[in-house]
Image (cartoon, rainbow, N blue to C red):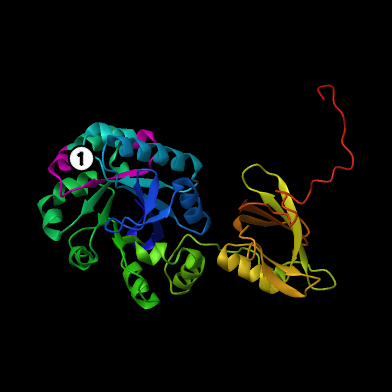
Amino acid sequence: MEELSKAYKKFVATIYLSGKSCVRSIANREEISNDPVKLAKFYEDNGADEILIFDLSRGEEEHESALSYIRKINSASAIPVCAAGNIKSFEDAVRLLYAGCYRIVLNFAKENNIEMVKMLSDRFGHEVLMAAITSTDVFTEHKELIENNISELLIMHEDCTLKLLKKTIVPMLVPLADIPLERLIDYLDKDVISGVLGTVVNANIEELYGIKELCSDRGIRTYGFKASLKWADLKKDDKGLVPCIVQDVTNKDVLMMAYMNEEAFDTTVKTGRMNYYSRSRKSQWLKGETSGHFQYVKSLYADCDSDTLLAKVSQVGAACHTGSRSCFFKEIIKTKGILD
């Protein structure tokens, strides 16, 4: 386990899955999305470090539907996916692990979950197990079992957090409301707290890279973008611009080419969304601001001469203003092979 004082702190997005729908919370079953895979991708693209899925299904049919979506989310996701809820048996736990989940959460308020801990830990390792803690009494009663067989605690109520800080060195993932930055920093600065989830993440997901940058500025290690080259290190053209070639990170298609000025470059690095400079309008623009076809940065490279950039992105919709997925669709010449 990484030394706690040196550990990166994570921001975990939460999906509350009720059958085929994503709802607002455990208590509020208002639908916010009917496409769980798309919602998971949205959280990933905007900088979530992990996704925690609560299966809130009622009945076997809904549960099977939820499990199917959990498999699909795991297949589509480049970040770890954890699962909680509706784990009633050893078989339920195993099915989630075989569905690709990085970790599963066992609710220690339920006796049958406690009985499975040692068996699951022996078979799959303690790294795949989290314990949902609803009170300090629950933790105290099972402290030895938890510390020997659990890799992380999921604190279900914020008021338990401070009471547990001096009781254990097991990393704690804590739920937070939409709180001021100073209070967030105060939580993340505590060695035993591994990360946060809840409204503070879900409600601020589109500003998450900026929040991570502010945390990093205050000495909190986060999984944000850390640019190894600055704008000053790049070679610009006579108008002070640098061309940027944009490639789809999934299928490697070249999508478009545009220019960046310093402001566009810095904003791209800070927000994780591609920004450019329009030579015709003489202004910065955010790709997708009017169309919704955002480009989420997965990596950014400079060429050997540092005068051209290559961005690998997760593209929403079409990259071209014509509606084409790529701007490069006008074929000029193409070789013919024996198989053509």
Closer to the camera, 81 or 30? 30
Q: Is residue 100 magenta?
A: yes
The residues colored magenta run 96-115
Residue under the image location 81 percent in, 22 percent down:
339
| Residue 230, image quadrant | bottom right
Disc 1 designates what residue?
Answer: 117
Closer to the camera, 71 or 141? 71
The quarter of the rendered structure image containing the C terminus is: top right
In the visual, does 84 lie left or right of 324? left
Residue 209 x, y percent position in the rendering: 51, 65
Please indicate, yes or no, whether residue 220 appears anywhere in the rendered image: yes
Residue 157 x, y percent position in the rendering: 22, 62
Residue type, mark 1 in image: Val
Q: Is residue 233 magenta?
A: no
| Residue 73, image quadrant | top left
Residue under the image location 78 percent in, 73 percent down:
281
* Above or below, 235 relative to 155: below
Tell me how many marks there are. Answer: 1
Q: What element carries label 1?
A: helix
